[in-house]
Amino acid sequence: MSARQYPWDLREVPWSDRPEFTRGLLDGTPLLSWGIGPRDKLATRRQLRAMGLRPGGQDPAAVLYFRCRKAGKKVYAELFLIERAKPVRPMTPGRAAALDKAMTARRTCRQCGETGWAELPRAHRTCEACRYSLGLPPDDYLHDYLSGTPTLTADEHAALDAVPDNVIPLRRPSAVDGSWTSRKGVA
Ligand SMILES: [Zn+2]
């Protein structure tokens, strides 16, 4: 029979005057298992946020570990002292604008400057079309969706989109004056 990975350990902790039972230290921080942490003194970052608080620069007072069934693994969560948390800073127009700009930059391709609706990969922030025209690395997932080699260069593709001067743009046939055939002679 193997020993417990995290045996019980009575030690001094920042949230209590008396020694409390912990599961030892994890990188110098007291480690707690599920259910032994005081919920009125310790909270995760998100629990603080729900209370309108933020850690405010403090280091985590403890680390909670538990097995997450959904993730299928052991999860470690940083716990902060509620009494040392600070209120969330209010949103100002300048701060909102700065956040908006930062979020837009994440969706903007650095090659073509186009802004899409999804965040682009952090490594390069390049859209799929640009990655394809720049040449895909051999292990890129786009190879699963594309086959063959491009037959047109980027400039030739752009030329396809432009409407040449000698072509009359198509117009929708209106219900008033009939069919496409009646428009053939229009110059
Ligand atoms: Zn692009």
Image (cartoon, rainbow, N blue to C red):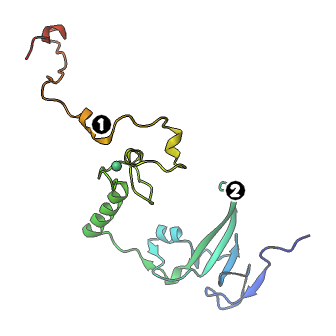
Residue 94 on image: x %, y %: 25, 69
Q: Is residue 88 left or right of residue 5?
A: left
Pinpoint residue 76: horizontal percent, then vertical percent: 64, 69
Residue 126 in the image: x percent, y percent? 39, 53
Residue 72: which numbered mark, if any? 2
Residue 138 - label: none
Judge by depth and name the residue closer to the eye, 109 or 134. Answer: 134
Q: Position of residue 153 (x, y in %)?
A: 33, 39
Number of residues whose C-alpha sits closer than 10 Å to that of mark 1, classed few (under 14), some (14–19) or many (20 or more): few
Query: Looking at the picture, does residue 95 appear above or below residue 20?
Result: above
Q: Disc 2 residue type? A: Gly
Image check: 93 left or right of 185? right
Q: How many marks?
A: 2
Q: Nearer the viewer, residue 115 or 162?
A: 162
SS at badge 1: helix
Outermost residue on the right side: it is 1
Residue to which mark 1 is pinned: 157
Towards the viewer: 2 or 150: 150
Which residue lies at the image location 61% right of the left edge and 74% below the top edge? 39
Left or right for 149, reference 158: right
Residue visible at 47% across and 35% down? 148
Give the spatial CA distance, label 2 vs label 1. 47 Å
Q: Amino acid at mark 1?
A: His
Q: Quadrant of residue 11?
A: bottom right
